[in-house]
Image (spheres, grey):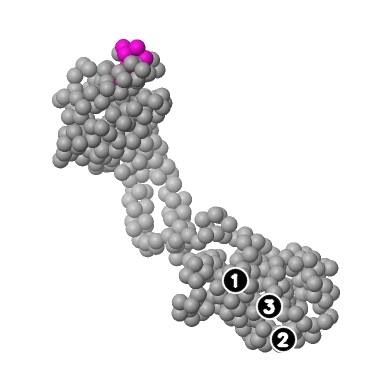
Amino acid sequence: MDSSEIENQLGDFAAAFAAIPEVPEPPQTTLDIISERTREKYWNRLLRYFLDPSAPHGFGSDFLREFMKLVEDRTEFGGYYDTGLDAVQVESEISSDRGRPDLLLYLDDEWFVCLELKVTASETGQQTKEYATSTQLGDLVVSEYTEESRVYVYLTKQGRAAPAAAEFSRLHWRDVQATIDAFLQQDRGQYPSKSTAQLADFRDTLREETMTDRPFDTQQAEFVELYLTHQDAIDTVHRAFDRMVETQTEEWVTHFQEQYLPESWDDSWNCGADKYGKIYKDEWRIDENGKQVKGWSDAAFRLEFRHDIRKESSWKKGEVRFRTDVPKNSDEPYRDRCQSVFNSYRDEVRATIDSSKIAVKGNKRVLTEATYSFDPTRGPDGYYTALREAFEEHVRLVPQLTEIFEGTYMTLIDE
């Protein structure tokens, strides 16, 4: 693919991208955050908790009452009376003589509701037929309840297959969501805010999973289609970007010293020829005897400037992050002492960097830091121009940094 083809494709891509409506990503629910949005057991636990009048949510039997109205409205259940709800028992995965239904709501000797919950899975075999013909559900003897006072509910999404057993009435999660909405709208501050927030979070999970038209998902699907349509051009320019970052990371010392050398640069400065972007003075490399060394591995005590040339974000955002760095692989006593000595110079350092972009950090790794912006479309030229600016601004700190460095390592050698 030649450059003109790439340019034409990217032009079409840009136009199509601009035509897609902007839809912000909705906040994640708790189950989204833990990547369990469609796990049936969590939906079961949450619904059981909110329905249980004895649970510490503060709703009492109020939410249970609204849920029972929904069941009564959508089924042939005739055993529900709006009394005694505070005594209703709510149990999950109860044992029966023919399987383990998900939820059982019952009022002793009055009525029961047996629920089977489905989120993404379908009915396993003849589950509902097994439950409908069970003679015992937990401690309940089914025959002791009249047909009008017992009901079997199959709770699933709209459009899913009907339950195998005719005895099971179908209820949809969207109905439960609507019930929660109505319940929350009626709240006048009488319930604990934490509980209403948790119930609203569960409602949002139901909404996200049951919506047939989700604007954000639609937008994401359009982005995927757009990428697949233009993937050759996109991948080609992305590979070129990766190669550029890799090349500059490997060759930055040569480019910087041959084309962008700062005016204040002299023979006492060196660059580390690696991806870590080190710039340092000879006198900032000292061994355990107080002698200058060339290799960093021979230096027991080190100080250096660093910039993040290897990070893609530097090139994409158009930012050179430049800092005074105490290498993290230095001995802990040295790092502690260097931090302490530096912080004793804080006022002097602040006076020196006044009106500059440099910020005082004073932690064990970073003593000072500044970010210099450039137009990312300028590529390497923009980066090195900003790097030169960063060096020139930080040079004013060199006398104090050298004094701090010497005060640190000399004290440790004397010990």
The dominant secondary structure in magenta is: loop
Q: Is residue 239 left or right of residue 80?
A: left
Residue at numbered disc 3: 88
Q: Do tag 1 and tag 3 residues touch (Cβ < 8 Å)?
A: no
Residue 207 visible here: no
Residue 272 occupies quadrant: top left
Q: Point out the tag, 3 or 2, that comes first from the N-terminus.
A: 2
Q: Residue furthest front?
A: 415
Nearer to the camera, 251 or 191: 191
Q: Quadrant of the N terminus?
A: top left
Q: Secondary structure at mark 2?
A: loop
Residues under labels 3 and 2: Cα distance?
13 Å
Residue at numbered disc 2: 79
Residue 147 drawn at (x, y percent): 78, 85
Q: Is residue 290 magenta?
A: yes
Q: Is residue 273 left or right of residue 198?
A: left
Residue 225 drawn at (x, y percent): 46, 55
Residue at numbered disc 1: 50
Residue 45 visible here: yes
Residues under labels 1 and 3: Cα distance?
13 Å
Segment colored magenta:
284-291
Query: Which residue is found at the position 34% from the left and 27% from the top?
Result: 337
Query: Which residue is found at the position 37% from the left and 63% from the top?
Result: 21
Q: Point out the tag, 1 or 3, that comes first from the N-terminus.
A: 1
Residues under labels 1 and 2: Cα distance?
22 Å
Residue 80 occupies quadrant: bottom right
Q: Is residue 332 left or right of residue 397?
A: right
